[in-house]
Amino acid sequence: MPRKSDHDHPDQRERIAKAIARAGLASRREAEAWIAAGRVAVNGKTIDSAALNVTPADRVTVDGAPLPARERTRLFLYHKPRGLVTTHADPQGRPTIFAALPKHLPRLISVGRLDTNTEGLLLLTNDGGLARALELPATGWLRRYRVRAHGRVMQDQLDGLRQGVTIDGIRYGAIDASLERQQGTNVWLTFAIREGKNREVKNVLGHLGLKVARLIRVSFGPFQLGELPAGGIEEVKTRHLREQLGERLATVAGADFAAPVTNVPLAPPPPERGRSPSEARRAGVKPARQKRPPPGAQERADLPLAAGGGGRGKAESDKQDRSRGGQKKTRRLHRRYHGKRER
């Protein structure tokens, strides 16, 4: 008997904006804006307030189209490069991580954010409930960074951060920091935090007189950056994700591991073969340029070998042809400077 997923239970209620976000159409804020604009209807009636709970039995439409079926909860590891903004749309027109992702992926949201100049591991998911659960300080997942900073610091100063620190009225929780090495005027550190407040690493190190030059997140909870290249993305297998979340956190997130996967797997499309040059041009694919063989190459390659293996091979044939070419060139030069040879 097939196992029922969470969306098969009619008694499960959730906010309308949350239902839209889980369907992968928009974030909760965007869904609330759609509702205020009159774009969302429930059971045929347009609504103007997000303060409404719905069940899977309700018919929700956006711009007249029904919500797609809820997809399985998925998580992706992404190596964010420097220079990209962690947002779907930037008012300043800066490049975003979502514009850089492969187009065959589902609509994803980030678990927290990384600053524009911060690089390293960023978790992406198609489930807004999971993203919210992993962002909560109560979840307690450790986030590790490698930091290169300008200045000098002693280990005893870093040890003082284990009890937390208050900077400009903001309280930062316990921080585990250790000194890796001093390299000229720069220092390399490891930095581990659990809260992840806005610009926490830079603010705390600035409080110690250090200026962060490079910040790399190497892990988030049980997930590691590893050898994932910059700009690379890979999916966490469902079984591994379920094991790492545990039953309690999966319940808090409302994760659904039984629903189907509706989009293509995370893999580049296979290369197309068998196209003629004209078909490739019509499809917008530039055909590979074919190199023409040198004159006589096919004829030389088709020459049979003598019985017993004593015939000319291709290498020997080419060597003799080059020798003849050299002799002809010598005769031409002789005629150029000394006239025709006497016979």
Image (cartoon, rainbow, N blue to C red):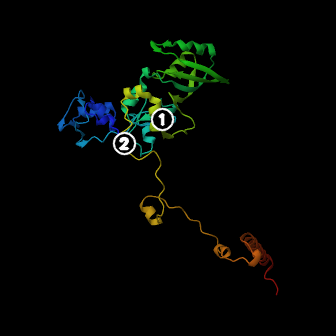
Name the residue that disc number 2 marks.
260
In the rendered picture of this protein, how many numbered marks are placed on residues?
A: 2
Distance, label 1 to label 2, CA atoms, is 17 Å
* Residue occupying the far right of the picture: 342
Q: Is residue 16 left or right of residue 316?
A: left
Residue 21: percent from left, percent from top: 32, 34
Residue 32 in sight here = no
- Vertical comparison of 115 with 173: above or below: below
Which is more N-terminal, label 2 or label 1?
Answer: 1
Q: What's the residue type where badge 1 is placed?
A: His
Q: Identify the residue position indicated by label 1 in the image.
A: 240
User: Who's the residue at 59% across and 16% down the image?
Assistant: 158
What residue type is disc 2 on?
A: Pro
On screen, residue 132 above or below 174: below
Which is more toward the observer, 184 or 221?
Answer: 221
Q: Is residue 48 left or right of residue 175?
A: left
Residue 13 on image: x %, y %: 26, 29
Image position, residue 321 (x, y; %): 74, 74
Describe the element under mark 2 as helix, strand or loop: loop
Q: Give the quarter of the image for residue 343.
A: bottom right
Q: Nearer the viewer, residue 134 or 242?
A: 242
Judge whether residue 37 can be spotted in this image: yes
Q: Nearer the viewer, residue 295 or 66?
A: 66
Q: Is residue 148 above or below residue 45?
A: above
Q: Residue at x 53, y 29 (%)?
A: 219
Name the mark on residue 268: none
Please give the name of the residue rendered at 54% of the width and 38% of the height, measured from the top-left corner: 230
